[in-house]
Amino acid sequence: MNNLRAAIAGVGFMGPTHTQALRRLGIDVVGLLGISEEEGRTAAQRLNVPRFYKSLDELIGDAAVDVVHICTPNYLHYPMAKAALQAGKHVLVEKPLATSSRESAELEALSRMVGRAAAVDYNLRFYPLCQDARARVQAGLLGDVWLIHGSYLQDWLYLPTDWNWRLEPELGGSLRAVADIGTHWLDMVTWISGQRVTAVLADFSTCLPTRQKPRREVETFASKFAQAGDADEMPIHTEDYATVLLRFANGAHGTMTVSQVSAGRKNRLWYEIDGSRSSLAWDSEMPNQLWLGHRESPNELMIKDPALMLPGARATAAFPGGHAEGYPDTFVQMFKAFYSYIAAGDMAAPRAFPTFEDGHAEIVLCDAIAASACDGRWVSVDAAAR
């Protein structure tokens, strides 16, 4: 695994995050690509990366690169992933995989055709206790899954002066809160429960119909530190909030609420899965605790400890009990699964990471949610895929 070498396209919030995680695994980051030559040069110097690329063609033409990480704004995911796969590179893309299901379907098919490993960075699966939650469902400890519900709440776009490229549909896509954080939540609960969403009923709100766009670039999550300056008032056409009713393939029901305007919620993903034997719940603000609910015995609060986790989940807990693990560690475990798969060399083997198939399924689900919010009715996910 350590012989594999990576290059990263995108040097905003995610590019340095990927760089740090790869280095913890002993994987060389040989180069970076910024939006501009100057951005790439500055980031390479700051992160002590030996090379910056002047173009995507230069990056994918570098024979030293085995794996391309795509950490750019959403509208670039499809063309960059396509070019990297066609150049014979393995590819890891930040979510969402693309901005349309046509694009994501093409990328899924292309990844199979060229025989390269292709992943979407739903890294939140790799919190140790989320892995344990999945192992518990698979072991039948919850019984039949009845209800799946929860939320993903943030406040980084709470003020009319908060700005990010995700607010612009031509850069981030026609969905915002659903595509940005809703796909994380949906990926998490469908992966843990093993249940596919079959129908949705969605309600959207744009709480701030106009915002102040600064006349200079603002990095993700950095708007709260921005200094006052010239700005233009811009209309907003994407959702600040969404609640979605869900129906699952096994007959289970659920709800998801996502918001980027919930004061005090910095980055809180919460879910609860209720079954015929017991329930479980997890909160990303307390990621080293898993709540286990019972009817006929006291409830339990499990503290992360690999010695107490189910065998199928232990490998993702890198530290012993009493040693907290958090957000940066999820990237390490995600990349470990991805790079170990590549190093093993069998592209037909089962994959322990989120794939382009998963990424495409999320985009199809987004299409159904968008159609439901527009029409005010239940929408079949299978119908949205056609």
Image: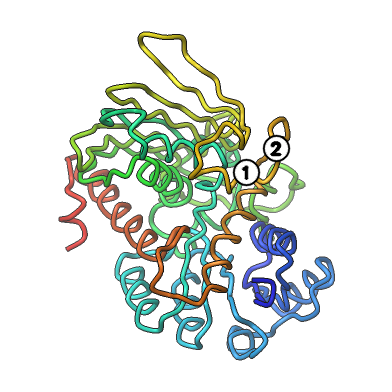
Total label count?
A: 2
**Pointers 2 and 1 in contact (CB under 8 A)?**
no
Q: How far apart are the two marked residues, 2 and 1, measured between alpha carbons?
A: 7 Å
Can you say whether 386 is above or below 181 in the image? below
Of 386 and 341, which appears nearest the observer?
A: 341
Mark number displayed over residue 320 = 2
Q: Is residue 110 left or right of residue 121?
A: left
Residue 244 visible (yes or no): yes
Of 14 and 75, which appears nearest the observer?
A: 14
Badge 1: how crowded within 10 Å, few (<14), some, or many (20+)? Answer: many
Q: Is residue 307 left or right of residue 300?
A: right
In the rendered image, residue 87, in percent from the top left (x then y), is placed at 50, 88
Residue shown at 17% from the left, 41% from the top: 378
Residue shown at 44% from the left, 58% from the top: 354
In the rendered image, residue 105, in percent from the top left (x then y), is placed at 31, 70
Identify the amino acid type marked 1.
Ala
Of 291 and 16, which appears nearest the observer?
A: 291
Residue 304 found in image quarter: top right
Badge 2: how crowded within 10 Å, few (<14), some, or many (20+)? Answer: few
Mark number displayed over residue 354 = none
Can you say whether 63 is above or below 313 in the image? below
Residue 284 found in image quarter: top right
Which residue lies under the disc numbered 1? Answer: 317
Q: Is residue 277 left or right of residue 315?
A: left
Q: Quadrant of the C terminus?
A: bottom left
Residue 146 found in image quarter: top left
Disc 1 is placed on an element classified as loop
In the rendered image, residue 201, in percent from the top left (x then y), is placed at 23, 39
Can you say whether 373 is above or below 103 in the image? above
Residue shown at 19% from the left, 45% from the top: 375
Residue shown at 47% from the left, 81% from the top: 85
Residue 169 visible (yes or no): no
